[in-house]
Image (cartoon, coloured by chain):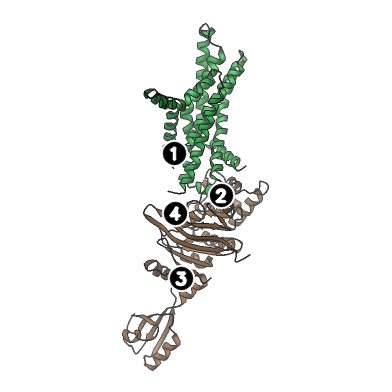
Amino acid sequence: MMVLSIALREFRNMLNSLLAWIVLSGLSLIIFLILVTLVKAYVENPASSLESPGVTSTIVATIFYFTAYLFILIAPMLTMRSFSTEFRHRTSQLLFSAPVSMTEIVLGKCLGLYFFTLLIAVIPIVITLSLAFGTDLDNGLYMSSLLGFILVAFTFITIGVFASALTDHIGIAALGGLGLILLLFWLVELVASLIKVEAISNALQYLSVSAHATPFYNGQVNSSDIVFFVLTIATFIVLTIRRLDSYRLQH
Amino acid sequence: MTGETLIQVDHLYRDYGNLHALKDINLTLNRGEVLGFLGPNGAGKSTTMQIISGNLAPTSGQVRINGFDIIDQPRQAKTALGYLPEQPPLYKELTVQEYLAYCAQLNRIASNEIKTAIERACERCGLVDVRKRLIANLSKGYQQRVGIAQAIIHTPDVVILDEPTVGLDPIQIIEIRELIRELGTDHSVILSTHILPEVQSTCDRVIIINQGQIALEDSLAGLDARLHQGTFQVALQNTPSCEELEKLDGIHQVEQLDDTRFILRCEDSFNPADFTTQAVQHNWQLTELVPQNRSLEQIFIDITCNDNTTQTGAAA
């Protein structure tokens, strides 16, 4: 109940912000251009696609995969304000002196941003569904790609919220979020490939978001990957709660 | 209901690194009382209020609101608490009504009662005419009122106001003071300020804090008594020397103003009737004996400039 109130407030805040609308319109344009490019390539050279499973794989999965990539940039932009402006304008005091727990505050904030992410997800969904007018889509692959995209987007959003809780400066919150997301998305893989000790290398490899996301775009829904995403999201939510608790100790 | 303790603060300490912002703050507040919290800048007023409101964790010590510990049982404690920080926590992109609705939700007011709660708060704070306007477009005084409305929307037992009249014009100040007095009848109010007449016009009890310690705690009546004791201006035509006057009972210090006038700083035992008798006996030709009211400012300055502060027990 309380979580929902905070979530709706955050969601409405997003709708009120210019940035969110710029993101929505920019994303629509980019995805539309990608779609056109992909469809053109597919129509001009259908032969190469005979070996591949078809339109859903070459176009739909690619679009969701690419949108997830764009979320590396989009997520920090959406989340940078969530806590840092509350700290800066001291509105956090309203939340902290209300009978609301830190857990409820963080869950509310994240949930509101998840709602907005789902709103953004409507764009690639509508654009890819337009293909259904001309051809048959592979429903299973479609759903798994969509699920992969949403899990990755939610993970990035949660990381961004954590970064935003670290500082009262939105620029630093955005950059910090971007850094953390890049680190988890593929820098860990890069580092893993450099480390010779197999145990450490494998452990780092496991932390890579990108490695856990790829199977979804091939139509594989592994429970281990879902668990990875859920755990990552939970970890960053807990870290954010801890951060807010310690905010009362210092400043 | 009066006499019920709503706020209990025990042995509060707060350090910022090596700086000891608060040292052993103790206070209690009963229902229906307005407590004035005075101190110079940087004395620890805001820190104390942030700790009482749960925004800041104390280094050690305990805060209980309505019997609930603010750290261990924050939800129950904060339900009974309304807090207006130094800078009102306003979402300026919202209208007054939207903002108060959100505050009502945060304070767990049932959804079917939110509308009446907003109406009541708007009425009490004089916001009825501006409720559809964006907070960003309101004047500072109205923003301050929205801040107060936010603090009282859930009719909490305890209202904490941190410098509520800062930046307001004189008429608004009077209105806000009236509102605070009105709040004091059914809520308990802690009011922090460095404006002394504000305390005299609104508070039942006063705590003066200096360098993180309570320098004085007294009822307003007790404070009034302090204002009226102690200093007299006398005019003696047949002028004695200062030394002669200082020898008299109960006189602490004498200051000569001009040829005939003196300021007598007296101890509590000083009796003006005795002084007139003495004056007649010495044939000093007493022509004036005027009690000088010490202003609250003087008491404040005496206390805050004196490093060896003595803590006085509450008379309330």
SS category of the residue bearing label 4: loop
Where is residue B71? Give x, y as percent: 52, 52
Residue A170, numbered circle: 1
Question: Dot 4 falls on which chain?
Answer: B
Quadrant of image for the N terminus of chain A: top right
Which residue matches tag 4? B59
Do pointers 2 and 3 mark residues of a single chain?
Answer: no
- Compared with B105, B191 (above or below) is below
* Circle 4/circle 3 CB separation < 8 Å: no
Q: Which mark, by number, is residue B312?
A: 3
Does residue A62 appear in the picture of this structure?
A: yes
Residue A126 as seen in the image, left or right of residue B231: right
> CA gap, disc 4 to disc 1?
29 Å
Q: Indicate the amino acid at tag 3.
A: Thr
B235 with respect to A239 (left or right):
left
Q: Which mark is residue A48?
A: none
The vertical placement of B196 against B248, above or below, is above
Tint of chain B: brown
Count residues near mark 1 (Cα–Cα under 10 Å), then give few for <14, some for 14-19, many for 20+.
many
Disc 1 chain ID: A
| Residue appearing at x 42%, y 35% in the figure | A176
- Mark 3 lies on a secondary structure that is loop
Report how far apart the C-alphas of labels 2 and 3 lie in the structure: 34 Å
Q: Residues within 10 Å of mark 3 (few under 14, many from 20)?
A: few
